[in-house]
């Protein structure tokens, strides 16, 4: 019996009279899936069921309109509006405008077609980072088509090289100059980012009821907003973050709930556009080499890795959904490797080896 897992459910596939049968069991239990496969095979042999005709595979254009766009809107429009409007909706419009690609059926799209699309975007003057954003949405759409059973496989899509990453590490002296030049609000926001590793949008939505003053050594904060389950996490407060939050809490007359960065906006909290303007002003006044605000998160994670944090713990702190994202921050030194091996050798064996070497 041949079953395999796709997403959270098991599928079965086998050959019957030269015909490939593949069907979802819609079950997450492998034993139940095998039983359903056996029952379907028995029914086929008795002639109780026939081989159903395969559904026609849609074009990429139809699939985007009928399946992928509704999924993306339902998933991100409320939970992460920026992800929906600034990424999925924009890039889906760009993909849909390239007819040589979207007019093809899903099962006929190859890596070469994706590369042609990338080349087309480059002729329009797009930078590698912008092209890769569109390719990532295309890759996500095609992989979900496989997971949903619409097509059997998805092509491998290669991203362009030369992409500008937000991986600038802010040096300690740069951090000091930046915080000194920034106003009180921007300095507080930057301090929280560089001491917790939160994403800027997570920090903007921080609420007083998510702060635990008596937890841990200096307190904790709960990240309750995120586009993945991993993003929702508990973080310890550093002494200086504890001090600035207490100062802001007391100035706000010690509220039980509400936004930490409350402002008179439609959302009730500080908006990214406001933070960006104040960040640019702080850079100009401090004379620090320019960096994007997200670099403060990268700086924190880099320092965490240099302090000896393992990839699994770092992933928990950062809210990464994949350990591969965290592994790039962790670079074990030669001393760390030697210490690990030393711990694995029993003390008696180590002592015996030392005596032999002396003889």
Image (cartoon, rainbow, N blue to C red):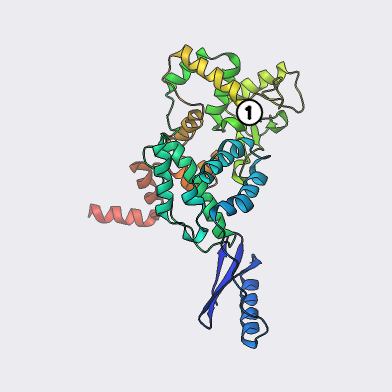
- Looking at the image, which residue sits at the far left? 359
Look at 67% across and 46% down and name the residue there: 74
Which of 343 and 197 lies nearest the eye of the viewer?
A: 197
Q: Is residue 128 visible?
A: yes
* Image location of residue 38, percent across then percent down: 62, 80
In this rendering, the count of numbered labels is: 1
Work out whether residue 282 or residue 68 is closer to the camera in this orientation and state it. Answer: 68
Q: Which residue is mark 1?
A: 204
Specify few, some or many for label 1: CA neighbours under 10 Å numbering under 14, 14-19, or 20 or more.
some
Please state which of residues 72 and 102 is positioned toward the viewer in this rendering: 102
Image coordinates for residue 257, horizontal then vertical, percent: 76, 28
Whole-percent x, y for residue 21 in the image:
56, 75
Image quadrant containing the C terminus = bottom left
Image quadrant holding the N terminus, namely bottom right
Q: Residue at x 54, y 46 (%)?
A: 96
Residue furthest to the bottom in view is 46
Whether residue 282 is situated above or below residue 135 in the rendered picture: above
Q: Is residue 30 above or below residue 296?
A: below
Q: Position of residue 318 (x, y in %)?
A: 54, 39
Question: In the depicted view, which residue is nearer to us: 84 or 290?
Answer: 84
Q: Quadrant of residue 274?
A: top right
User: Is residue 158 something one can see in this rendering?
Assistant: no
Q: Is residue 110 above or below residue 5?
A: above
Residue 1's place in the image compared with 109, above or below, is below
Which secondary structure, mark 1? helix
Identified at 51% across, 30% down, the residue is 294
């Amino acid at each position: 019996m041949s079953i395999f897992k796709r997403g959270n459910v098991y599928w079965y596939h086998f050959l019957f009279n030269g015909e490939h049968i593949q069907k979802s069991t819609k079950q997450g239990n492998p034993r139940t899936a095998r039983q359903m496969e056996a029952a379907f095979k028995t029914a086929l042999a008795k002639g109780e069921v026939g081989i159903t005709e395969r559904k026609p595979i849609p074009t990429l254009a139809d699939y985007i309109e009928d399946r992928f766009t509704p999924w993306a809107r339902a998933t991100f429009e409320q939970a992460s509006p920026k992800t929906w409007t600034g990424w999925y909706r924009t890039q889906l419009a760009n993909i849909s405008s390239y007819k040589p690609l979207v007019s093809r059926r899903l099962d006929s799209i190859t890596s070469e077609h994706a590369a042609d699309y990338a080349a087309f975007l480059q002729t329009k003057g797009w930078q590698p980072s912008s092209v890769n954003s569109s390719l990532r949405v295309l890759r996500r759409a095609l992989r979900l088509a496989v997971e949903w059973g619409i097509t059997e496989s998805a092509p491998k899509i290669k991203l362009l090289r030369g992409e500008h990453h937000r991986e600038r590490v802010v040096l300690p002296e740069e951090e000091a100059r930046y915080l000194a030049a920034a106003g009180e609000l921007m300095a507080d926001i930057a301090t929280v980012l560089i001491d917790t590793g939160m994403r800027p949008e997570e920090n903007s939505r921080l609420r007083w009821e998510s702060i635990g003053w008596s937890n841990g050594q200096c307190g904790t904060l709960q990240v309750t907003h995120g586009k993945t389950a991993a993003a929702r996490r508990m973080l310890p407060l550093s002494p200086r973050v504890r001090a600035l939050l207490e100062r802001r809490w007391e100035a706000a007359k010690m509220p039980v709930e509400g936004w930490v960065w409350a402002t008179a906006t439609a959302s009730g909290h500080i908006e990214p556009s406001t933070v960006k303007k104040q960040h640019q002003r702080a850079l100009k006044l401090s004379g620090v080499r320019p960096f994007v605000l997200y670099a403060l998160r990268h700086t924190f994670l880099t320092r965490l890795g240099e302090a000896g944090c393992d990839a699994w713990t770092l992933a928990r702190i950062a809210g990464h959904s994949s350990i591969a994202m965290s592994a790039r921050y962790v670079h074990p030194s030669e001393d760390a490797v030697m210490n690990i091996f030393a711990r694995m050798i029993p003390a008696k064996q180590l002592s015996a080896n030392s005596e032999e070497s002396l003889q």
